């Protein structure tokens, strides 16, 4: 029989993987263009609503909605990037913060108007709501699939970054934007594609999140904090950093709520502040 | 032998496998005008950054008038009289020229810590700032915001900011860089007018400046000091010619990369 | 003498910058108008004065020193809870309560300034946000002290200066809030026009250059941050004393974000920007208070996007540009 801590770690791992999917896009785009996009989680929320709506209104099976969530989020982000964000790449941090917070507020209001303020119900197929019991610990099937999916995506990302030409361009642009331009790399296009990819992943994360953390219009704001913590602690522009930070954050959050519920979110903020003070550029950040 | 105004011993710095400074030992006697030349990437600005404390060396010592300042933070080195100007203007865009120089003076006199008295009450600081601007022919534009000044005037403002701190050792990083021919005479006059109390080291590519003002030239290549000597010796040295001045003879200006 | 004349002018010029302009006098006279023109809105007016002071305190760090903080409400809340607790436990004298609140907020501000002064960019934003959230969580958990979700009860403010009692119509509340705002405004004005204020602008314009002119930037940042925290604490205390309640949202992220919106709306770095922005924001909110919260968020979002794109220097910046263009033609 395994002690309950294994269950806690498992749940924390699943949560962490979710946070990773939500955050990785933000980390890479921040590292590349230093563009603070607080509306990142609005795209995640969009993905969640896409999944919820497709399932409840059109009866689309769960796994089929996932690519839709990805595509819709990515496409929407492209529209925003082209029309609004592009103007702000040279702007002050404050302007970037304000504009993207404005978009978050708008998205929250629109979501409340269209979908109402209640939690979105999600009717998953029966097999996804079961759990496997192993050595006395319950492992929810959904979480197992989530971990598996997230790991697969992580491996794909890492391989893509290391071994494709596009990945090389991304790495160059994150490392030294000016030099990358000087070498003839179209940094703007690389950024646009990376931004779309990151937002798509966020949308996917949002879709997968509905079952675990629920979905209502405040999602865009609530999880923004967690994403920013993962990004700033993990280090800008670092996939590995986001991964590590997300796992640490996921496990600490679940463990904290399980073992010391009175502490609440206090622990997370304390951990973030301490880590940032020790390493202001993040655990694996380079800027 | 009087102590040199500035000396470095065995200064070294590398970024991973990239060695940007290797065993650098230079000595500046008081009141001299030395020039530091070398091809792009030789590590000249890096050396300035190491000396002023913007970069921490991996090894070596920096001595200011016999005091070891190797671990001193940048603003304290300035307080002791070690000041630099920037190759690319680093000014305060929305502050007027007068405000910028007054700020530098106030920081020196520690008036900048006072938040309970109005600035106009500090006549001495304002007068001193105005005086500096006058000697650099900037008095007529002292009330214009920095970003509205001509490039040559901004270069002069760079020097004005440095002078406001009453430097003992002044490191000028390519003072003539980017200054059009028509505006460079004021700049040259400003450098010529620098007091003999100040020890000056300037990085330059403009050989006219080097020959006009420097009594000794230090040549850096690949992070190391290649050799040093009086200007005419350096100009005719075959090593220097090959490495820096190029086979086709002396260029008057080398375009500098950022 | 010609030489004396020349040296006179730079100092005179700088003095002219610090002189009171007629429009400022008009502004402050106008703040008395609610007594005459809007006597039913005096409670709202006192809340505007509180918000204005809070926004002014943020302007000192954001507009003048360039520190982007999304956690400034922490100090507002510390001031509010201090004043509230002091009153709850028996000492309801408002001015001394203000002083205690200012002290508490100042101490917290001073302590955090040691961390704040070492960071920029995203790390700074995250640290200020994180600290604000941390304090809010603390206040929530320490329900035995703060009253938690229900808020602090049992605050009773005594007469201001022993004479003016806080009535239902808010006339004393407004007078009190306005007087404190004015006094602290004069203080802030003095700070901005001092040599220290000049160094703050230097920090905002080019932080890297500051050590190169011998400036101890970190020490400067610590000083202004402490001053800003103290002022924010006073604002919170006034709110606690005049409304005789303190709730968790005085520390919350919404309040931190709101004050940033107010300041940017009015125009940061212009001393009056926070005051103007607070007035516009609060009046608008009052007028639209009937609509549902999500619609409010929608319009605030639109406002933010519009301000960033069309009015980057806020209302006052836009007005300045208009008058410049008008005076040129």
Image (cartoon, helix red, strand yellow):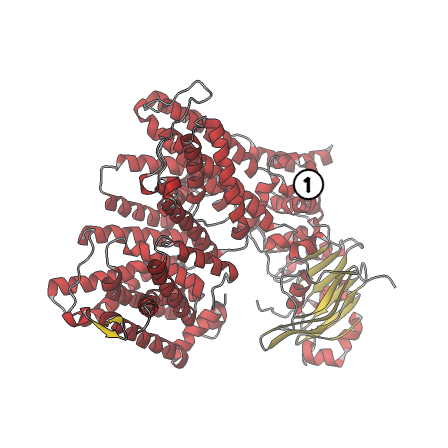
Can residue C326 be spotted in the picture? Answer: no
Query: Residue at point 32% right, 46% down?
Result: C303
Q: Nearer the viewer, residue B145 or A65?
A: A65
Taking C218 as reference, is A123 above or below it?
A: below
Local packing at callout 1 (Cα closer than 10 Å; few below 14, some 14-19, many 20+) is many
Residue B12 in the image: above or below residue C290: below
Q: Residue furthest right?
A: B1
Q: Mark 1: which secondary structure?
A: helix
Residue lying at 37% horizontally and 47% vertically, measured from the top left: C141
Identified at 58% across, 43% down, the residue is: C198
- Tally of numbered tags: 1
Query: From this viewpoint, is residue C316 visible?
Result: yes
Q: Which residue is depicted at the point 24% across and 73% down?
A: A133
Image quarter where the N terminus of chain A lies is bottom left
Q: Is residue A68 above or below residue C1?
A: below
Residue B113, image x, y percentages: 63, 42
Q: Which residue is mark 1?
A: B125
Percent across and percent down for residue C206 are 56, 53
Taking C155 as reference, is B1 left or right? Answer: right
Give the side of residue A203 with respect to residue B146, left or right. Answer: left
Q: Residue furthest top?
A: C163
Which residue is the extreme one toward the front? A1
Quarter of the image for residue C281 reads: top left
Chain for disc number 1: B
Residue B210: horizontal and vertical position, in percent? 73, 66
Q: How far across and how far down the image is residue C191, in percent?
A: 56, 37
Quadrant of residue A251 within the rendered picture: bottom left
């Amino acid at each position: 029989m395994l002690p309950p801590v294994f269950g806690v770690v498992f749940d924390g791992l699943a949560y962490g993987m979710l946070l990773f999917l939500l955050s990785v896009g933000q980390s890479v785009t921040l590292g590349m263009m230093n563009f603070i996009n607080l509306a990142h989680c609005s795209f995640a929320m969009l993905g969640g609503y896409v999944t919820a709506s497709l399932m409840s209104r059109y009866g689309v099976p769960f796994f089929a909605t996932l690519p839709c969530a990805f595509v819709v989020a990515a496409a929407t982000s492209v529209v925003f990037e082209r029309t609004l964000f592009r103007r702000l790449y040279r702007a002050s941090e404050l302007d970037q913060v304000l504009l993207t917070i404005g978009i978050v507020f708008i998205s929250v209001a629109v979501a409340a108007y269209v979908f109402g303020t209640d939690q979105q119900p999600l009717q998953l197929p029966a097999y996804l709501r079961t759990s496997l019991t192993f050595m006395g610990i319950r492992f929810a099937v959904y979480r197992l699939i989530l971990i598996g999916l997230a790991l697969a995506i992580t491996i794909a990302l890492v391989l893509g970054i290391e071994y494709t030409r596009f990945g090389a361009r991304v790495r160059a642009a994150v490392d030294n934007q000016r030099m990358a331009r000087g070498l003839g790399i179209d940094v703007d296009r690389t950024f646009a594609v990376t931004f779309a990819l990151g937002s798509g992943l966020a949308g996917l994360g949002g879709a997968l999140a509905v079952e675990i953390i629920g979905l209502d219009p405040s999602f865009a704001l609530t999880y923004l904090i967690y994403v920013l913590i993962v990004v700033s602690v993990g280090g800008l522009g670092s996939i590995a950093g986001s991964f590590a930070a997300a796992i640490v954050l996921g496990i600490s959050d679940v463990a904290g709520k399980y073992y010391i519920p009175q502490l609440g979110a206090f622990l997370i903020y304390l951990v973030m502040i301490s880590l940032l003070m020790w390493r202001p550029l993040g655990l694996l950040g380079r800027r | 032998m009087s102590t040199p105004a500035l000396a470095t011993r065995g200064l070294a710095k590398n970024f991973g496998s990239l060695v940007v400074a290797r065993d650098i030992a230079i000595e500046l006697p008081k009141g001299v005008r030395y020039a530091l030349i070398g091809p792009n990437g030789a590590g000249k600005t890096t050396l300035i950054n190491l000396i002023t404390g913007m970069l921490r060396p991996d090894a070596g010592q920096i001595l200011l008038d016999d005091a070891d300042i190797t671990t001193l933070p940048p603003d304290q080195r300035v307080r002791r009289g070690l000041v630099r100007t920037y190759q690319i203007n680093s000014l305060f865009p929305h502050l007027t020229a007068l405000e910028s120089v007054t700020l530098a003076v106030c920081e020196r006199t520690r008036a900048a810590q006072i938040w309970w008295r109005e600035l106009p009450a500090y006549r001495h600081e304002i007068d001193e700032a105005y005086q500096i601007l006058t000697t650099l022919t900037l008095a007529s534009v002292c009330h214009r915001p920095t970003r509205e000044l001509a490039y040559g005037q901004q270069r002069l403002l760079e020097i004005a900011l440095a002078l406001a701190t009453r430097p003992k050792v002044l490191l000028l990083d390519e003072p003539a860089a980017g200054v059009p021919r028509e505006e460079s005479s004021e700049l040259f006059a400003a450098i010529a007018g620098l007091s003999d109390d100040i020890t000056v080291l300037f990085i330059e590519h403009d050989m006219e400046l080097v020959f006009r003002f420097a009594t000794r030239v230090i040549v850096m290549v690949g992070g190391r000091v290649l050799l040093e000597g009086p200007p005419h010796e350096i100009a005719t040295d075959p090593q220097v010619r090959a490495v820096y001045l190029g086979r086709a003879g002396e260029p008057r200006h080398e375009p500098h990369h950022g | 003498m010609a030489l004396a004349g020349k040296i006179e002018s730079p100092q005179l010029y700088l003095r002219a910058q610090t002189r009171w302009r007629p429009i400022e006098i008009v502004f402050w006279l106008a703040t008395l108008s609610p007594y005459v023109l809007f006597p039913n809105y005096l409670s709202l007016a006192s809340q505007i004065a509180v918000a204005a002071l809070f926004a002014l305190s943020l302007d000192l760090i954001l507009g003048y020193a360039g520190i982007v903080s999304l956690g400034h409400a922490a100090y507002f809340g510390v001031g509010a809870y201090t004043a509230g607790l002091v009153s709850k436990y028996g000492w309801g004298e408002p001015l001394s309560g203000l002083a205690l609140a200012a002290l508490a907020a100042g101490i917290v501000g001073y302590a955090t300034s040691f961390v704040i002064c070492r960071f920029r960019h995203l790390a700074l934003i995250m640290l200020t946000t994180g600290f604000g959230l941390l304090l809010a969580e603390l206040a929530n958990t320490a329900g035995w002290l703060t009253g938690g979700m229900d808020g602090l009860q049992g605050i009773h403010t005594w007469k201001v200066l022993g004479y003016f009692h806080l009535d239902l119509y808010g006339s004393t509340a407004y007078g009190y809030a306005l007087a404190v705002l004015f006094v602290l405004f004069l203080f802030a004005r003095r700070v901005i026009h001092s040599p220290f204020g000049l160094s703050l602008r230097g920090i905002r314009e080019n932080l890297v250059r500051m050590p190169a002119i011998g400036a101890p930037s970190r020490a400067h940042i610590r000083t202004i941050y402490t001053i800003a925290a103290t002022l924010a604490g006073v604002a919170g205390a006034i709110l606690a004393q005049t409304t005789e309640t303190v709730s968790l949202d005085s520390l919350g992220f919404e309040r931190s974000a709101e004050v940033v919106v107010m300041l940017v709306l009015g125009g940061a770095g212009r001393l009056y920007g926070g005051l103007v922005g607070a007035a516009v924001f609060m009046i608008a909110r009052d007028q639209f208070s009937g609509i549902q919260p999500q619609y409010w968020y929608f319009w605030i979002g639109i406002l933010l996007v519009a301000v960033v794109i069309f009015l980057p220097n806020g209302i006052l910046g836009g007005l300045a540009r208009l008058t410049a263009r008008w005076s040129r033609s």
